[in-house]
Image (tube, helix red, strand yellow):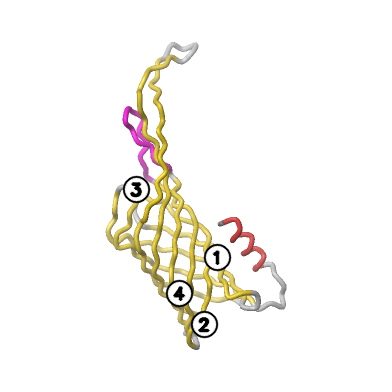
Amino acid sequence: MRYVICSLLLCFTTGVASAQHALKISTNTRVAPAFRLNHTTHSNAFSSGLKLSVYSFDKAPVELGLYYTRGYDSSVAFSYGVMLAFIFDVYKRHRLKLGAANGRLKMDQYKNEYKEGGIQEDNLHKTYFAYLEWEWLFAKRLSLFARAGYRFLESETTTLHNERMETIPGTGREIPVYDREKNTRFYGSGVEFGVGLSVTID
């Protein structure tokens, strides 16, 4: 999905000059009251990020964008991905957006145990986010927005079993080896609320 959106975004930015298009830069702050990450739930997890998006009402009431986010917890390095939203004009300077985002959550701290029963977590989780956004265009190029949505995460963990010793040829050194049991989990990470400011560049 992210490759398709990136391709469409490139087409929009290099499209026909006569089309009515706009480039938007946004900054936002979010809070997740109960942010679930693997088997741990973090209360009031804050994050902040940037988004670069483009839309063209001549072609379709659709917004395509790229995002970068930091925060949530000290174990998270950053998050990045692509998004797509359908835009609805509701009243004068007010808009509603129904969107979805797909990306990756890069971990800075994660389990990497090498022992019997040890758990090894992946350091790059898949993330999916569905949201509803209200936008108020209070000036020609400036707008405020509020967003609410729900995030899903997909991660992979490996559990080590059946420890045994094997000898390295030529050295005589023995090392432990294990059978590996992989488990992919898809789970709800929780609701998120956010506010932000956007600047439009025609």
Separation (CA) of disc 2 from disc 1: 19 Å
Which of 197 and 38 lies nearest the eye of the viewer? 38
Q: Please say if the residues under marks 3 and 4 sit with CB atoms less than 8 Å apart.
A: no
- Whichever of callouts 3 and 4 sits on the residue coming sooner in the sequence is 3
Residue type highlighted by circle 3: Asn
Residue 97: where, in percent of width, then height? 48, 74
Residue 193: x percent and y percent? 36, 68
Mark earlier in primary sequence (2, 1): 1
Mark sitting on residue 146: none
The residue pinned by badge 2 equals: 89
Horizontal placement of 41 versus 175: left or right? Answer: left
Task: Please give the residue where the numbered disc 4 appears in the rendered image.
Answer: 197
Task: Give yes or no for residue 128 being in the magenta stretch.
Answer: no
In front of the other: label 4 or label 2?
A: 2
**Circle 3 crowding by C-alpha within 10 Å: few under 14, some 14–19, many from 20:** some
Q: Residue 158, position in %: x, y? A: 40, 36
Q: Give the foreground label among 2 and 1.
A: 2
The residue that label 3 is drawn on is 38
| Residue 132 coordinates in the image, percent (x, y) | 43, 71
Residue in the picture at 43% in, 44% down: 123
Q: Quadrant of the rendered structure where residue 173 is?
A: top left
- The residue type indicated by label 2 comes to Asp
Q: Quadrant of residue 192?
A: bottom left
- Number of residues whose C-alpha sits closer than 10 Å to that of mark 2, classed few (under 14), some (14–19) or many (20 or more): few
Instruction: Say which residue appears at 55% left-offset and 76% top-offset.
Output: 200
Residue ID for mark 1: 65
The amino acid on which the numbered mark 4 sits, given as a three-letter code, is Leu
Looking at the rendered structure, the secondary structure element under dot 3 is loop
